[in-house]
Amino acid sequence: MKKYLLILICLMGMNLQAQNNTQTHNGAFLQLRDIVDGKFNAKGISAMQAMPDGEHYTVLSADKKAILKHAYKTGKPVDTLFHVDKVRETKLDAIQGYALDSRGFRILVWNEKEEIYRRSWRAVVYDYDVRRNFLKPLSDTKGKIMIPTFSPDGRMAAFVRDNNIWIKKFDYDTEIQITKDGSAGKIINGITDWVYEEEFSQTNMLSWSSDSRFLAFLKSDETDVPTYAMQLFDGRLYPDSYSYKYPTAGQNNSKVGCYVYNLDTKDTKKMQVPLDADGYIPSIRFTPNIDQLAVMTLNRHQNNFNMYFVNPKSTVAKLVLHDESEQYIPEDWILELKFSANNFAYVSEKDGFAHIYMYAMTGALEKQVTTGQWDVTKFYGFNPDTKAVYFQSAEESPLRRSIYKVDTKGVKTKLSTQALMQAGTNNANFSTNYKYFVNTFSNTTTPNFITIRDDQGKELVVLKDNKELQAALSETRLPNKEFFTFRTENGDELNGWMIKPTNFNASKRYPVLMVQYSGPNSQRVLDAYGIDWECYLAEQEGYIIACVDGRGTGARGAQFRKCTYLQLGIKESDDQISAAKYLAGQSFVDKNRIAIWGWSFGGFNTLMALSRSKNIFKAGIAVAPVTDWKYYDSVYTERYMRTPNENAAGYKAGSPLELADNLNGNLLIVHGTSDDNVHVTNTMDYTTALVKAGKEFEMQLYPNKNHSLLGSDTRYNLYSRIIKFLKANN
């Protein structure tokens, strides 16, 4: 669920008549359609793939016809590796993606891409022989394939079709099927089920050994996982339906096991990895050492993490790393484990903050690389030759992010030094040898400024400066975002931001819209660029927009983010209520016109705040909300709440469904009927409870739309609907 934070939009309110206005002495008015259509979105660069030599990267051309090789030193193209108009045998108009082999002899390209869930897809994949300039289908068997994965020597590629794993051998132009038990809704080989994809961010569960002799894979048996069915409204007299396996909290998960196929002996063995019957394997990866397959396991409570090195021949597993928590182990750090032939690095919260630890391959701790009362927020890896470690952190402030490296002597160097020394948010993408990185910087007033830098932080190339957007911003009437802190009644200091109309008059009293997400380890209060609905609402309807990150949110240490454990919705809603009281005490705020809204977890917390307060919020908007955690998926929910049987009191206390009688304020609830993540069941059962409680409310449904409610027309309709609701009810 937390990944939807990226698509959350702070919105509200506008005077639709004002859309006809074009200019004021301060610049052009913001237009709702312009914002929906992305006029003020910062431009990025094409997705980059670092090449093995460490000196080059590749991108897909803007017309999607060519794969271009660029030099890190200059950022300029130096070669064309593939072009649809120049290949022999198979002609394509364009391609949608590609993968390069390690030697540069072959490229896999794909077309007719079909999205499945958030990350998974299947496509028609082609094999391009660079030396012969020859393009043909990767497989002779019909049907789209998933997760095409080169072997390290580039002489083979594994892929999945219809839940079974195949290997294409390029030297012999043959393919072999190595699993045959794959079956929809039952056995899955090499890919993941819905909940692994959603909550462990994994779709590819294949791993080749460094000598290309072994292929490890995850096998999942989802036979006993309950099925969820959604109706599809496509104009037929009788609606069609779509069903898939979805484990809600406390229900059966897939049974998983790790297997290895031996290409020499052509047999498959199950690895003898200790695992609870209901445990998880969120990641499998061969280390550079051929006899060390790293298998990561979690118990169902997700508070005990073990990493085993397994010998693919003997199948014997050795425990190398153990980490545990009274609450839970963040899945992100398991996925960001980094290996060399002699060391591995892992991020743990065992000293109260997220920090990097270096281990020998025996599992012996060598050193703690980072220390301090701050969190590492991303771990990029380490150079196996120089031993320098690269990471992003919130050391300067929870509101900001910078890029650092630490050398073998413990000397820390800040790499994301901007020319103007501006504070803000930096993200990095490193070359394979860590000699270069692409840095993306932004802050509240600066859209993405993207550069290539060396490993000392020296700027080499400006890839994107967004000058055109900067010019458009300067010609548009935009309010500023101001950061603030305040203390709650409990003494907790919380961070927030506030937007006021550009014609703000301190002697007036303004209505307020509070925007929030509030989910575990999330953040909305960041010094980063974004022009969203809060700016529009401030300008067109004269609103104060405010956002506060309460307890449970990120970059402030493990205690702060894990204090909501077993009681989701209590501290989070308390803090939004406290924030509303703080705002109501400001001389320029109309305390009788405070509204709150959120999407997904934010929608859930909106309902909790409306139900756990009285005469604080006049209105609330909940989009795609969880209304009882018993409806949500097992991995996410149990990570923070355990199962309904283990934590009945926590589930009840944090259930808007149970608190329907206490709903206070005007409510608009919104949902897509094809939401595969937070099912529309949440909204349907909640509105039934509201009717039973005699509560009035408004509801908006979007047929066949998923959790994101994507589409310009859909978003325009959604925000217009919410604006109308706010004008009438706040």
Image (cartoon, rainbow, N blue to C red):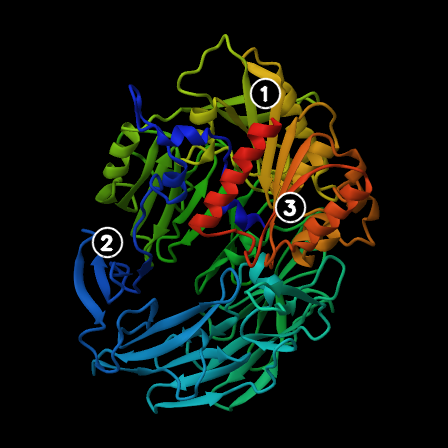
Separation of residues labelled 2 and 3 (CA atoms): 44 Å
Task: Tell me if residue 460 comes above or below residue 341 in the rendering.
Answer: above
N-terminal of the pair, mark 1 or mark 3, is: 1
Q: Are marks 2 and 1 in contact (CB under 8 Å)?
A: no
Query: Looking at the picture, which amino acid does disc 2 mark?
Result: Tyr
N-terminal of the pair, mark 2 or mark 1, is: 2
User: In the shown orientation, is residue 581 left or right of residue 726?
Assistant: right
Q: Nearer the viewer, mark 1 or mark 3?
A: 3
Q: Nearer the viewer, residue 309 or 97?
A: 97
The residue beneath circle 2 is: 72
Query: For the C terminus, which image quadrant?
Result: top right
> Could you tell me which residue is drawn at 67 percent across and 32 percent down?
666
Query: Looking at the picture, which amino acid does disc 3 mark?
Result: Pro
Callout 2 secondary element: loop
Q: Are marks 1 and 3 in contact (CB under 8 Å)?
A: no
Q: Residues within 10 Å of mark 2 (few under 14, many from 20)?
A: many
Q: Residues within 10 Å of mark 1 (few under 14, many from 20)?
A: some
The picture places residue 523, in percent across and down from the top left corner, at 53, 38
Label annotation for residue 625: 3
> Could you tell me which residue is drawn at 51 percent across and 11 percent down?
508
Separation of residues labelled 2 and 1 (CA atoms): 45 Å
Query: Looking at the picture, which amino acid does disc 1 mark?
Result: Phe
Q: Nearer the viewer, mark 2 or mark 3?
A: 3
The quadrant in which residue 228 appears is bottom right
Callout 1 secondary element: strand
Task: Tell me if residue 555 comes above or below residue 186 in the rendering.
Answer: above
The residue beneath circle 1 is: 486
> Could you tell me which residue is drawn at 34 percent across and 69 percent down?
98
> Could you tell me which residue is drawn at 52 percent across and 55 percent down?
359
The quadrant in which residue 225 appears is bottom right
- Residue 461 in sight in this render: yes
Q: Are marks 2 and 3 in contact (CB under 8 Å)?
A: no
